[in-house]
Amino acid sequence: MLRMRFLGGVRRIGASGILVDTGKHKILLDYGSYPSKKPDFPLPVSPYEVDAVVLTHAHIDHSGAIPLLYKGARGPILIATPLTLELSELLINDMIKISGNKLPFSKVEVNKMMQHALPVNYNEQVELFDGIRITLRNAGHIPGSASIELEVNGTKIWYTGDINLTDTRLINGAEIVRDADYVIIESTYANKDHPDREKEERRFYSTVKELVEDGYTVLIPAFAVGRSQEVMCILWHYGFDGKTALDGMAQTATSIFLSYPEYLRDFLELKHSAKHIKWMKSRSQRRKMLRRPGAVISPAGMFSGGWSEWYLRQIYNKEDAAIIFVSFQVPGTVGRKILDEKKVVLGGKVREVKARVEFFELSSHSGRTQLHQIISSLENPEKIFVVHGESDTAEKFAEEIYEMHGFDAIAPYQGDIAFLD
Ligand SMILES: [Zn+2]
């Protein structure tokens, strides 16, 4: 009896979690949280029942609920790439800090989680239990990210996690597992294609370059893990020679990336760009940086905290400043309001943003055409489960998989159980 239960991250994005029950063992694929002020987790599981957790990548929406499994119980073993493990510890501890200890776990559980960690590199098969094998494959989403190939007594399940086929400056595009019997695929951008990557990189580079040459201070709010370093590498790669600065947790993440050269597409590119960029350490250094034209890369990517929020307060009302978004801005965030309305709420007052605002699409997820490319590469799957997308998008993608490729596909609801034999 092999079955899967969708605990979260279905018909929405956030709080991913899938429980695979082999009849003898229970294995969790991701266990994340929904990034909001009020913690929101997938359906609960008893930590006494789960034998192993396999984590695709460090983003909180995939990893942020794992510490719950170490409350009181001995806890399951945690499998991920060594880079994902280190980044997860950083991000979960930061989430605890930001929440002001409102989460149902603390650093104690995170430490316990790390004690149970089993680092596994890409393409290294691990026999977890009798007849149960796991292999992690490069998912091309952020450094260290993996898709999961899980074999249970000859039946193969492939969970894509967040997947990107495009090579980015930082990492190589994903590998596709063609011979799976069951596929669980993300659908974040199943309804749209991204602009051509190289063209978008060049457009981003020239915009930053021209603005800085024209005397602007350019603020680039970016996620600490992945996007900040991607932006650094783009600027370096195309030859940006203006003043640049890196701030906040993106510095720690950069140092971690640099200690895993084998997970990067071009280690030297990141190393050189990290050497060239100024690492902001003090408030006086930051003020000095803002006095002359230059570009600052800083988390949080949507201004939900971190140093980017501080920079925003300094520059929002300046006509010789620019805010350059490099990732999707979730509705309801400070970033989205700036992007849509050029307004920001500061000290309880709505204020007009005088700085120039631009947006670039440097996505780390596959777009529509690539998701279909993945499906058409599959040999003969029994069934495809569409997850990690807004409800309409996921449902439409499942319908298209059937209509265009002839494979049985559904977009499950939270709590749904799928019997696989
Ligand atoms: Zn992700």
Image (cartoon, grey):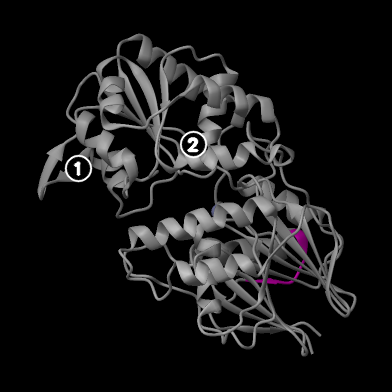
Res. 18 mark? none
What amino acid type is highlighted by mark number 2? Ser
Tell me the mark number nearer the camera, choosing from 2 and 1. 2
Q: In the image, is residue 31 above or below residue 197?
A: below
| Image quarter for ligand 1 | bottom right
In this picture, which residue range is highlighted in magenta?
405-410
Q: In the image, is residue 106 above or below residue 393?
A: below
According to the image, label 1 marks what residue?
344
Q: In the image, is residue 247 above or below residue 148?
A: above
According to the image, label 2 marks what residue?
228
Residue drawn at point x = 50 percent, y = 72 percent:
109
Question: Which residue is nearer to you in this view: 327 or 65?
Answer: 65
Q: Is residue 218 left or right of residue 145?
A: left
* Snapshot quadrant of residue 73: bottom right
In the image, is residue 406 part of the stretch drawn in magenta? yes
State the separation of the CA atoms marked 2 and 1: 23 Å
What amino acid type is highlighted by mark number 1? Val
Figure quadrant of the N terminus: bottom right
Q: Is residue 292 left or right of residue 258?
A: left
Residue 213, position as x, y percentages in the image:
37, 9
Residue drawn at point x = 51 percent, y = 31 percent:
231
Residue drawn at point x = 12 percent, y = 44 percent:
350
Question: Which residue is nearer to you in this view: 288 or 408?
Answer: 288
Report crowding for label 1: few under 14, some 14 to 19, many 20 or more residues within 10 A (C-alpha).
many
